[in-house]
Each structure stands twice: as structure tokens, then as C-alpha cells.
Image (tube, rainbow, N blue to C red):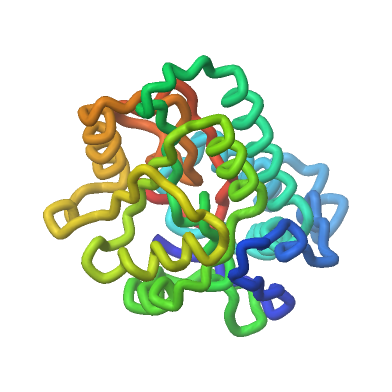
Amino acid sequence: MKLLVLPLFFLLVSTTASASRSSFLNPIHLLRQEYSSSEDHNNVANTTLDCVSWRLAVETNNIRNWEVIPDECQTYIGHYMLGHQYPSDCEYVAGLAYDYAKGVELVGDGKDAWVLDLDDTALSNAPYYYVDNSYWAKDYNKTEFVEWELKGEAPAVPGILDLYNKLLELEFKIVFITGKDETTLRNITEYNLKNVGYHNWEKLLLRDSTEASLTKLEYKSKKRALVVADGYRIWGNMGDQWSDLLGENPGNRTFKVPMPMFYLK
């Protein structure tokens, strides 16, 4: 997996329970990448990539198994993540999820579940992607990423904490399923969740040592199967990767949070 590193003007967000959309806003709202010339824009045979279309293809899973953002789209994706559009898109998805949730006729036996992924779904790793005042892609470094996770400083993804609170009001049981390591990251993950406002959940499932070799798709399917075997009905399932939403027992309805910076199988 390769990550986009975000630039200096990223605003580091606080980890208080009131983490908000404004924490992610910057004075950038780039809807389309800039072409080097009108010829680039008009010539369909030109090698210049339409980065808006590339992002759409990524989000719809039409481009799969990619390792790095194309060079010509790194600035565009950085502006997308740091500007108004990313938080707006997250809030829009959260709104659609809530509209669906309000219409679900819960059985009311304590087994009506809503599954949430953690990394870049409930909690944002955007501060980790910031480095070196530049846009560029780098190889995923597990050691560096775990060091970031152990800080417990990930803020809430825009719109998702509000959705979580509304789901609790509707009496859904929240099940968090994450690929974070059970042994080293459970305590700090619980701390991070509570610190930004996720105070209650039915289950918090992390990856144990026997599951280390599983792909994310296999792992998420396995964990959801355990939830269903325990008698829960998965009414909603939300994640930032397609591997969160495909496979066995995906739930009655799935919702994808935008994430064009990396692809996980």
C-alpha cells in the first residue's frame, strides 16, 4: 500500500469529543485538476489524466488493486482531501446512511447491529499523511504507521461521529471492526475512540495473530460472520474501502466513505 503525503497547510485537529467538520477545512476548493494547456484539456488522446474521473473510478471500484496515486493527480487529491469537498462528501454519505437507518424497522431485541470500520471511516488518519510540505507518494511503512496509531490522536472523520450518535438514538448496536492489531493497539484504540466522542459500542473487533495472513476482504468477512453467528442482524455496514463492504455477510445496506489515497484488498 502506498500513501499520499499531505502538505504543510494541513490543519492538525484536536482530539476532543467535539471534533468537527471545520477542523478539516482549508481555503482550497479545487474541483478539477489544472491542465497545462487548453490543448491538454481538449485532446482526448493526450496523456494528461482527468483526475476527477480517476477519483470517480476509484470510488466506484472500477479501478482496482492500484498502488499509488498517479503523479499528475497527487496535487489534485491533496486539494480534495484538504479542501471543502472531502468533508462535504463524508457528511453527504453519513446523511444518506441516516436516512436509510431511520426507515429500518428494528426488531428491538438488542441484536440490531450497525458495523463501522475504524481507519478513515470512524477515525481519520489524515494527520499521519502530512509531512514535508509537499505532495508525493511513499511506500507504506508499517513501523511508522503503528507509531502514529500508538499516539491515539486520530480525529473523527467528518460527519461520521454525528451519524454514530444518531444511530445510538435509534437504538442500533454499534460494532466496530478494524484491522488494527489486538495485542498492541486495543487499549490505545479504545482511548482514541472515547477521546473523540465514540463512547459506547457493542463490540470492538481487532485482528489477532491467527488472522495476520488474511486479506482485508477475508478478514472483514470472517469478523462479520462471527457477529452474525452471535445472533446479530447487520442492517448497515460502512467503510472507506470496498474490501470493507464486499464478501460474506456484508449487511442489508452498505455505505462507502470516500478515500482516494490508497487501496486495500
Q: Is residue 249 above or below residue 12?
A: above
Going by the picture, which residue comes out furthest to the right?
A: 38
Q: Is residue 72 visible?
A: no
Q: Nearer the viewer, residue 171 or 94?
A: 171
In the rendered image, residue 99, in percent from the top left (x then y), is placed at 65, 26
Q: Nearer the viewer, residue 69 or 102?
A: 102
Q: Is residue 16 left or right of residue 145?
A: right
Q: Is residue 211 above or below residue 102?
A: below
Q: Is residue 245 visible?
A: yes
**Residue at the location (37% across, 32% down)?**
246
Q: Is residue 174 left or right of residue 69?
A: left
In the rendered image, residue 144, in percent from the top left (x then y), is placed at 39, 78
Q: Nearer the viewer, residue 56 or 72?
A: 56
**Residue at the location (47% across, 42% down)?**
239
Quarter occupied by the N terminus: bottom left
- Quadrant for residue 37, please give it: bottom right
**Residue at the location (63% across, 38% down)?**
94
